[in-house]
Image (cartoon, rainbow, N blue to C red):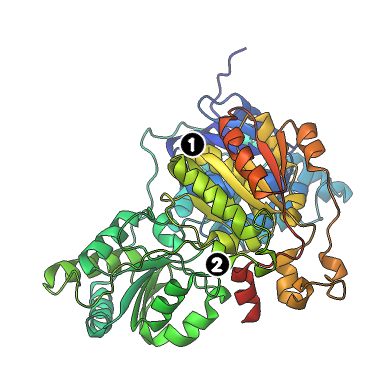
C-alpha cells in the first residue's frame, strides 16, 4: 500500500536531501524505527547500514568533510553513547554531522511515572543522551511532539551548516512517524554573520602593520578554510600577496598542492627541513583557518607575536584580539588591501618556492639501509606515491588517516588534490581511518586510499564489511608491525634500538592476525606484501579492482622508526 502521510521523518530527510545528503549511515533500533522505516523507502537517499556505531559515525564524519553535511541514525542510549567518540572528533575538527535518534515515547514515560519502570537502553534519565551530546554539538534537541517540528528541524540544520559542527536531534518514539507539513523547495542556507565595521577596520589595520613590516612573510592555512568554502579566497590572497604557504596536518590539501607557492605541509618536527626552517624563521605568519593543537607548541611559543590569525574564534594580530570579526570578512578585507597596494604581489621579499625534495629515502629508518627490499614506512610511501603519480591517480583518490606513525609520514606527501586528505590530526583518534573510508568514498565519489596502523585497524575492522556490503573498492593498507608504534615512541623510544635488550612495553604489543583470512570472511580482496618488489607488483593489481574493498597487509619491521617519528619523539 502506497504511503500517503508525510511525516516528521520525511521532513528531515527532505531537508537533508536538499543539502546534498544522499546517503545516511544507520544503526537500527526499536525506538528509532519510525525514522529508519521512512529512510528505507525515501527516494533519493541511500541507507548505508553500518556494522557498529563507531563505523557509522566515523563514516558520517568523513562524508561530511567531503560532501559538506552528513547524517547518522542511531538507537537511543546504547548506540548514541557508543558513537560519542566519533562525534566528539567531528566537533573538534569542524565536521557537520546530524546525529538522529529517538527516545522512549509519551506512553513509556507515563508507565515509568506510574510503575517506576526502567526502560531498556536507558540510564534512568531520559534526558541523558541530549545532556551528553550538548557537549559535542552546537545544538541538541528532543522533540516531544510534531507541533512546531518543522521550525525546530530547520533551525537545527542551519546551525550545523553555519558552524560546520555536529547537531543532535531525537524524538519521542512516536513523533518521527507523526504528520508534518512538507518543507519549501528552497534549500536551507547558513546564517550570514557580519563583523562590526569598526572592529573589522581595526583588525585589518593592525594586521596590515605587521604584514607590511615583514621581510619573511608566510601563509599558514588550516582546515577551516576548506570547511567554510574559502579555498578560492585563500588562493586569491596567495596570488595577490606573493607569499609562500604551508598547511597544518589537518588542513593538508586545503588547496591543490600543485601551485607554485606551496612549500609543503608543516607538521612540526615531522616536516621536511625546508618547511620547518621557513615557518620558524618567518617574521609574519598569516595564519588562516587553522586549529592550533599541541602538535604546534614549538611554533606557537616562538611565533605567537608574529602571527596574524583568523579562524572561527575571531581575529588576532600579534597581541590584539578581535573576537567578533569573522574569518571571511577579514580575508576579504585583507585581499582588498593587497590588491590596492602596488608593492604586492611580492617578488623581492617573498622567497621563491623551494624545490620540494624527495622526502622518503632520507627519512627511512637507517637500520634498514643495507637491504633496499625491506619495507619501511617511508619506503611504502615512496613507492605507493610514485605509483599514484605515474598513473595519474592522485586526482581520483581520497586519503584517510587516523593517528598513527603513517599519518606523520604521510604529511610529507606532495601534489595532492584539494580536499583529498582526511585525517584525525587534531582529535587524534586511533582507528578513525578505517571507519572513515566508506564515508570518504561515498561523499567524494573518489576511491578511498586508507593507510592504517594495525592497532587502529583492529579497533574497527568490521568497517571492512560495510565497504564490502556496499561494493566500495576502498583500499585499506595495514602497516603490520604488531605494535602500537606511535604510542611506544612517546613512552620509550629506546625500544626501537636493535637487540633483544630493548623491548616494547607489554601494553603496546598487539596480537597477530591472519589478515588474508579476515579479508575473505568479510568479502574483501586480501593481499600481503613483505618486500618492495611485492608492493610494486600488488599496486597495479589493486588499481584494477572495481567492486570490492581491498585489504593489504604491509609487513614492516617491528622496530622500524621513521625519522619523522624519531624527531617528534626526541622533542
Graded by Cα atoms within 10 Å as few (under 14), some (14 to 19) or many (20 or more), the crowding at tag 1 reads some
Numbered tag placed on residue 42 in the rendering: none
Label 1: which secondary element: loop
**Which quarter of the rendering shows the N terminus?**
top right
Q: Position of residue 541 (x, y in %)?
A: 61, 33
Q: Position of residue 370 (x, y in %)?
A: 67, 63
Foreground residue among 33 and 68:
68
Contact, CB < 8 Å: mark 2 with mark 1?
no
Residue 368 appears in which quarter of the rendering?
bottom right
**Which quarter of the rendering shows the C terminus?**
bottom right
In the displayed structure, would residue 36 be above or below residue 120? Answer: above
Between the residue at mark 2 and the residue at mark 1, the CA separation in whole angstroms equals: 35 Å
From the viewer's perspective, is 370 left or right of 420? right
Q: Position of residue 227 (x, y in %)?
A: 43, 55
Label 2: which secondary element: helix
From the viewer's perspective, is 249 left or right of 111? left
Q: Nearer the viewer, mark 2 or mark 1?
A: 2
Determine which residue is flagged by label 1: 445
Residue found at the far front of this picture: 370
Determine which residue is flagged by label 2: 362
From the viewer's perspective, is 167 left or right of 490? left
Foreground residue among 548 and 118:
548
Q: Position of residue 313 (x, y in %)?
A: 43, 71
Amino acid at each position: 500500500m502506497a504511503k500517503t502521510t508525510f511525516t516528521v521523518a520525511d521532513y528531515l530527510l527532505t531537508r537533508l536531501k536538499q543539502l546534498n545528503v544522499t546517503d545516511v549511515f544507520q544503526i537500527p533500533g526499536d525506538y528509532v524505527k519510525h525514522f529508519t522505516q521512512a529512510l528505507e523507502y525515501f527516494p533519493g537517499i541511500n541507507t548505508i547500514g553500518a556494522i557498529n556505531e563507531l563505523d557509522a559515525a566515523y563514516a558520517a564524519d568523513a562524508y561530511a568533510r567531503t560532501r559538506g553535511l552528513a547524517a547518522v541514525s542511531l538507537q537511543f542510549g546504547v548506540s548514541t553513547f557508543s558513537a560519542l567518540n566519533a562525534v566528539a572528533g567531528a566537533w573538534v575538527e569542524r565536521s557537520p554531522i546530524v546525529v538522529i535518534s529517538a527516545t522512549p515515547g509519551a506512553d513509556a514515560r507515563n508507565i515509568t511515572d506510574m510503575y517506576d519502570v526502567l526502560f531498556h537502553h536507558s540510564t534512568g534519565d531520559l534526558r541523558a543522551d541530549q545532556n551528553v551530546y550538548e557537549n559535542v554539538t552546537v545544538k541538541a534537541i528532543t522533540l516531544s511532539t510534531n507541533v512546531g517540528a518543522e521550525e525546530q528541524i530547520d533551525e537545527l540544520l542551519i546551525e550545523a551548516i553555519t558552524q560546520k559542527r555536529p547537531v543532535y536531534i531525537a524524538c519521542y518514539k512516536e513523533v518521527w512517524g507523526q504528520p508534518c507539513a512538507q518543507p519549501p523547495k528552497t534549500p536551507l542556507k547558513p546564517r550570514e554573520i557580519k563583523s562590526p565595521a569598526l572592529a573589522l577596520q581595526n583588525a585589518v589595520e593592525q594586521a596590515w602593520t605587521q604584514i607590511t613590516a615583514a621581510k619573511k612573510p608566510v601563509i599558514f592555512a588550516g582546515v577551516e578554510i576548506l570547511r567554510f568554502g574559502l579555498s578560492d579566497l585563500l588562493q586569491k590572497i596567495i596570488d595577490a600577496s606573493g607569499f609562500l604557504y604551508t598547511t597544518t596536518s589537518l588542513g593538508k590539501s586545503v588547496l591543490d598542492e600543485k601551485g607554485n607557492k606551496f612549500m609543503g605541509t608543516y607538521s612540526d618536527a615531522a616536516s621536511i627541513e625546508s618547511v620547518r626552517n621557513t615557518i620558524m624563521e618567518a617574521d609574519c605568519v598569516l595564519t588562516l583557518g587553522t586549529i592550533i593543537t599541541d602538535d604546534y607548541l614549538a611554533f606557537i611559543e616562538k611565533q605567537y607575536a608574529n602571527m596574524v590569525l583568523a579562524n572561527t574564534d575571531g581575529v588576532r594580530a600579534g597581541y590584539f584580539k578581535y573576537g567578533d570579526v569573522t574569518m571571511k570578512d577579514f580575508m576579504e578585507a585583507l585581499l582588498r588591501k593587497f590588491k590596492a597596494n602596488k608593492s604586492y604581489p611580492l617578488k623581492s621579499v617573498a622567497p621563491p618556492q623551494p624545490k620540494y625534495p624527495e622526502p622518503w629515502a632520507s627519512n627511512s629508518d637507517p637500520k634498514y639501509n643495507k637491504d633496499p627490499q625491506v619495507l619501511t614506512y617511508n619506503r611504502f610511501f615512496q613507492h605507493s606515491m610514485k605509483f599514484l603519480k605515474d598513473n595519474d591517480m592522485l586526482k581520483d583518490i581520497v586519503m584517510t588517516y587516523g593517528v598513527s606513525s603513517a599519518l606523520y609520514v604521510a604529511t610529507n606527501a606532495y601534489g595532492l588534490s584539494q580536499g583529498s586528505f582526511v585525517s584525525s590530526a587534531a582529535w587524534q583518534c586511533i582507528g578513525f581511518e578505517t571507519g572513515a573510508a566508506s564515508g570518504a568514498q561515498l561523499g567524494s565519489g573518489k576511491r578511498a586510499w586508507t593507510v592504517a596502523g594495525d592497532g587502529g585497524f583492529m579497533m574497527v575492522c568490521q568497517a571492512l564489511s560495510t565497504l564490502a556490503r556496499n561494493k566500495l573498492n576502498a583500499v585499506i593498507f595495514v602497516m603490520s608491525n604488531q605494535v602500537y608504534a606511535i604510542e611506544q615512541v612517546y613512552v620509550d623510544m629506546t625500544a626501537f634500538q636493535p637487540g633483544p635488550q630493548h623491548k616494547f612495553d607489554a601494553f603496546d604489543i598487539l596480537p597477530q592476525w591472519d589478515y588474508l583470512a579476515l579479508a575473505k570472511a568479510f568479502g574483501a580482496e586480501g593481499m600481503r606484501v613483505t618486500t618492495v618488489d611485492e608492493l610494486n607488483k600488488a599496486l597495479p593489481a589493486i588499481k584494477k579492482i572495481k567492486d570490492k574493498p581491498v585489504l593489504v597487509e604491509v609487513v614492516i619491521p617491528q622496530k622500524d622508526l621513521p625519522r619523522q617519528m624519531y624527531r617528534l619523539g626526541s622533542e
